[in-house]
Structures are given as structure tokens and as C-alpha cells.
Image: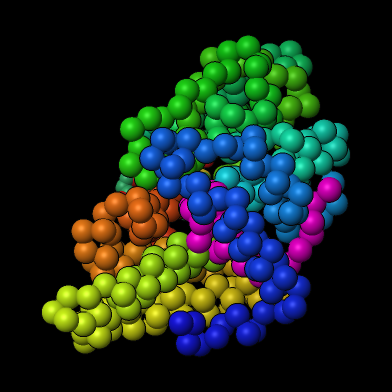
Amino acid sequence: MDVLRVDDRLTDEERLVRDTVRAFAAEAVAPRVAGWFEEGTFPVRELAPELGKLGLLGMCLTGYGCAGTGAVAYGVACRELEAADSGLRSFVSVQGSLAMTAVHKYGSEEQKGEWLPRMAAGEALGCFGLTEPDRGSDPGDMRTRARRDGSDWVLDGAKMWITNGSLADVAVVWARTDDGIRGFLVPKGTPGFSAGDVHRKMSLRASITSELVLDGVRVPADAMLPGVKGLKGPLGCLTEARYGIVWGAIGAGRSCYEAAVDYAKTREQFGKPIGAFQLTQEKLAWMEVALGQAGLVALHIGRLKDEGGATPQQVSFGKLANVRAALDVAREARTVLGANGITLEYPVIRHMNNLESVLTYEGTQEIHLLTLGKAVTGLDAFR
Ligand code: TGC
Ligand code: FAD
């Protein structure tokens, strides 16, 4: 397995991150996560401080208690977290790449000092409210509004599908103002601000997903993120989180692949292991190819990022290609396990169902296809 030995190209520091995060996920999460998935829970308050101690929250950010690692190290961490469950990587993505990045990139010194050290330590939780009930792929047409009232801002609207929405101590809420889209920091408990969880999910069950309601929410002038105006604000954070998914998806795919290989070597039918049949070997060989290619794509984009920046189009390429590859691997692995593949005794169907969300959030497959289509043709299919 790992015929290409892509990890041989990692530095010693990146390998240390890999081994540390892999050990943490294997000990603290993997043995319990099927239960969380079944119950639809995720013990955020227990895990967040541990993730903070490992330096995984806002890992690429500098200062304010953040680890300040390179992009490849962060990617490797996402891969190892998502090998346990996409919900775990999602938590780290939303906390670090979305909420903390918004504050770090666009916040005032006071906002950074107030929130980032506690968020890096996992003591304060954040969420990122961009999507709305009626505006998902097209956030530029958002309906949530913020209007000035004296020196305050008053927010009205709703955000939907917000990871950690009901748990977060602070919500980064994107809203339309007379002056364009702006970001606001809305602390939990602000009058008029409420959050209710989405139930009956069949995917990302080990993750809390909420609706945020903003009903005349009054915040002071300094709750606005001063450093950015326009849709490029939230999109600039999304590029960071999408990058983590480029790597994370490989972890989910790898977990399915490993389960399929183990099963194929031990499960016997017609007097021999099913892994001895050519059709099974073909499935496993394609999985190996898909994950090897995904690993090269992730490493390439990560190195570009570390050398000065990967473009949003390159990140779209990686998110599109690697989530698709991981989902194909998960579905094929599911067939190798036969009936056992549909139970939570094995990780495969959990990952497979999770990857349906990963395909949709952070820009759907279609959005990334059209982003690449625009890069290729110079023609904008969106507008
Ligand atoms: P468009 O006119 O193309 O762009 C508006 C401005 O933004 C800039 N820009 C970007 N900047 C940084 N990163 C990117 N990826 C960027 N893409 C565009 C652009 O240069 C422009 O800047 P300026 O200075 O000219 O104003 O905007 P559009 O309205 O046509 O939309 C483009 C489109 C469709 C690609 C965008 O709306 C989009 O990406 N839609 C998908 C929405 C999405 O991904 N939502 C995710 C919500 S968060 C989430 O899902 C969290 S899941 C939990 C987890 O991560 O685990
Ligand atoms: P829609 O935009 O309504 O799309 C429906 C379908 O139409 C899709 O197949 C889409 O690709 C297609 N479509 C749309 N436009 C076009 C087009 N121009 N051409 C072709 N096809 C098109 N959001 C946040 O802001 N914060 C979060 O923390 C967050 N966490 C999430 C967690 C989970 C578990 C999930 C499932 C979602 C989360 N999201 C979050 C929301 C996510 O980003 C959106 O679901 C996603 O952007 C798609 O929006 P939508 O679901 O409204 O689908």
C-alpha cells in the first residue's frame, strides 16, 4: 500500500506532525467515533482543548498562540484527522481555517487579542456563517442584512448548515450592508441571536450542524471586521478550508481502502480469499491509483502554497479531484465488504456518507467544475 511512497517527500517536521496526529486520532477518536456517529453527537468541549494542545487549531496562522506551521504540515494533519472521521477534520477546518482565519486576516488588534489565543487553545469555539437557507452556492446574493443604528450595527437574517453553530462562543456572520458584504463577530448570548441544530442527518453525524437566527441582533461598531469588504472576504477564508479538504479527503479514502484490503485478504468465498479474485484486485488497484494521484495533487498544491501561494483555481482543482477520488474509493470499498460494508462495525459506510457532505460543502462539485471551466475558457458561467 502507498506504492508511490508520496510521504517520503515529507520533511522530518511534517512526518512528526503526521505521526503525532495519527496517534491522537487512533487513540482518542477512532475507537469511539462510530458510536458518536450513531448517536449524532460530537464531544467538542472534550476534544477542542486536546486539539489545541497539539497546535492544530489555526495551525498555519502566526502569533496569538497559533502554531505557525507550513501548509503541507497542516494538510498532513487534516489527512490524519479525516482518516478518523470527516467530522473531526470539519471541526478543525471551521475553527481554524474559517473562523480564526477571518479574525486573523481581517480583524482589528483588539478582536485578534480577544479571540485568537482562546480559540487556538480550544477554550473558545467559533463558527462561520455564510450559507443561508435560500442562498448556498451563491452567497454573493445573501439576504442577511446589517444596518447602522447610531454607532451600533443591527443584524437581521438567517444562516443555515453552520458547523458548530449552537456550540460556538463567537459566530463570524457575513451580512450585506449599504457598503457591501461585511463580517461581524457575534458572541453567543447576544439578544436576538439563537441557534438550533439540524437533526436527522445521514452524513457528518459526528458533527454539530445548526441554523443561526439573527432577529434584530445589536452589536457595537467594533464587532465588524474592519479589514475586508465584499465577497472576497469569506471566499478568502474558504480557500484555506478547501485546501485542508484537498488533504482530508485522502484520509477518509485511505481508511476505506485499508478496510477493503484487510477484508479482501481474510474473507473467503469459493474456497479462497476474495482478494485472490482478479475483479477484487482490480478494485483495489484502482483505489491505490486514485489515492496515489490524490496524494501527489495535495502535496503539489501544498508545496505551491508554502512557496508563496496556491491560486484559488488550484485549490478548486484539488478539492474537486480529491473529494471525487475519495468518494469513488469509498463506494468501491463498500462493495468489497459485501453486507458487512453497510454496518458501522467497519468505517467504510460512515466515511462514504460523510463524503457526500464533503462533496457539497466548501463549494459543490459543480461550483468547482465551473470555477475550472472559467479558468480554462475565460468565460464566466455563473453570471
Ligand atoms: P466573484 O465575482 O467570482 O468573486 C467575488 C470576489 O471574490 C474574489 N474571489 C476569491 N477570493 C479568494 N478566494 C476565492 N476562492 C475566490 N473566488 C473569488 C474575486 O476575485 C472577487 O474579488 P473582487 O476584488 O473582484 O471583488 O463572485 P461570484 O459571486 O460570481 O461567486 C463565485 C463563486 C460561485 C465561485 C462563489 O460564490 C463560491 O465559491 N460559491 C460557493 C459557496 C461556498 O463554497 N460556500 C461554503 C460555505 S462554508 C462551508 O461550507 C463550511 S463546511 C465545513 C467544513 O469546512 O468542514
Ligand atoms: P445549492 O446552492 O442550492 O445547490 C443545489 C445544487 O445545485 C447543487 O448540486 C449545486 O452544485 C447546483 N448548482 C448551484 N448553482 C449551480 C450552477 N450555477 N450551475 C450548476 N449547478 C449549480 N456553510 C457555512 O456557511 N458554514 C458552515 O459551517 C457550513 N457547514 C456545513 C456542514 C454540512 C454538514 C453541510 C452539508 C453544509 C455546510 N455548509 C456550511 C453549507 C454548504 O457550504 C452548502 O450546502 C453548499 O455551499 C451548497 O449550498 P446549498 O446546499 O444551498 O445547495
Closer to the camera in the image, 8 or 363: 8
Task: Name the residue rendered at 52%, 22% in the picture.
Answer: 195
User: Does the magenta segment cover residue 234?
Assistant: no
The quadrant where residue 198 appears: top left
Q: Give coordinates of residue 48: x percent, y percent.
A: 67, 42
User: Does the magenta segment cover residue 67?
Assistant: yes
For residue 351, above or below residue 210: below
Residue 103, can we see it?
Answer: no
Q: Give coordinates of residue 84: x percent, y percent.
A: 51, 56
Q: Give coordinates of residue 164: x percent, y percent.
A: 55, 35
For residue 374, above or below residue 34: below
Magenta span covers which residues? Answer: 65-90
Task: Name the residue rendered at 45%, 62% in the picture.
Answer: 252
Residue 89, can we see it?
Answer: yes
How many numbered dots are placed on residues in this image?
0
Q: Quadrant of ligand 2?
A: top left
Q: Give coordinates of residue 192: x percent, y percent.
A: 58, 13
Task: Name the residue rendered at 69%, 63% in the picture.
Answer: 20
Task: Name the residue rendered at 48%, 47% in the picture.
Answer: 33
Q: Residue furthest front?
A: 271
Closer to the camera in the image, 250 or 85: 85
